[in-house]
Image: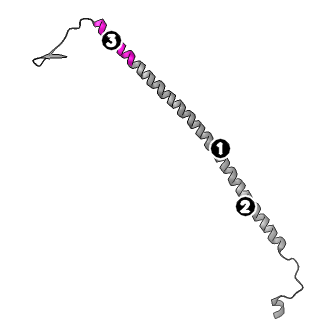
């Protein structure tokens, strides 16, 4: 706005239809820019959603593998314990030997 000697000069609007057209054109441009930004954001969100789904699937597969490995490990340890325990019991003599032991000799 122009001023003369510090006083604001108001210009009379010559063509109000022209100003209304300019405002509508500006508003449409702003709407188009907003719609483009919204579309870009939606595209990014859909890509992130797909990545999240892939990550969830990978995590669930790894968790199942982890559980299977732990279960197999526990079963393997149980098998080893059972095997060593049965071997130890099989190796113990069930009959007394014919040779006298130290305790028998001292009597």
Instruction: Using a 10 Å C-alpha cutoff, classify the residue at mark 3 as few (fewer than 14 neighbours), some (14 to 19) or many (20 or more).
Output: few
User: Would residue 65 be found to the left or right of residue 100 on screen?
Assistant: left
Residue 9 got which mark? none
**Secondary structure of the residue carrying numbered label 3:** helix
Q: Nearer the viewer, mark 3 or mark 2?
A: 3
Helix, strand or loop at label 1? It is helix
Within the magenta stretch, is there residue 56? Answer: no
Residue for badge 2? 77
Q: Are marks 3 and 2 in contact (CB under 8 Å)?
A: no
Query: What residue sits 62% from the left and 40% below the top?
Result: 57
Which quadrant of the view contains residue 106? bottom right
Q: Position of residue 4 (x, y in %)?
A: 12, 16
The x, y position of residue 99, in whole percent, is 88, 87
User: Is residue 85 positioned above or below 16 on the image?
Assistant: below
Q: Residue furthest left?
A: 5
Q: For marks 2 and 1, give the CA distance.
A: 24 Å
Residue for point 50% across, 27% down: 42
Q: What x and y, as percent, mark residue 96?
A: 87, 82
Report the magenta residues as a range. Answer: 16-29
Magenta highlight: main SS: helix
CA–CA distance in space, label 3 to label 1:
59 Å
Residue 22's disc is 3
Quadrant where the C terminus sits is bottom right
Dividing the picture into quadrants, the one containing residue 3 is: top left
Query: Quick one: which residue is furthest to the bottom in this view?
Result: 107
- Going 36% across and 16% down the picture, which residue do you hit? 27
**SS class of the residue under badge 2?**
helix
- 65 or 78, which lies in front? 65
- Compared with residue 35, is residue 93 higher up or lower down, i.e. above or below? below
Residue topped by disc 1: 61
Whichever of labels 3 and 1 marks the residue nearer the N terminus, that label is 3
């Amino acid at each position: 706005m122009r001023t003369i000697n510090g006083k604001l000069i108001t210009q009379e609007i010559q063509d109000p239809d022209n100003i209304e057209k300019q405002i509508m054109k500006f508003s449409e441009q702003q709407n188009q820019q907003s719609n483009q930004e919204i579309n870009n954001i939606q595209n990014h969100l859909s890509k992130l959603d797909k990545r999240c789904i892939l990550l969830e699937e990978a995590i669930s597969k790894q968790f199942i593998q982890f559980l299977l490995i732990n279960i197999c490990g526990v079963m393997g340890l149980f098998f080893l314990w059972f095997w060593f325990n049965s071997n130890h019991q099989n190796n113990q003599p069930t009959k007394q030997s014919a040779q006298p032991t130290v305790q028998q000799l001292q009597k």
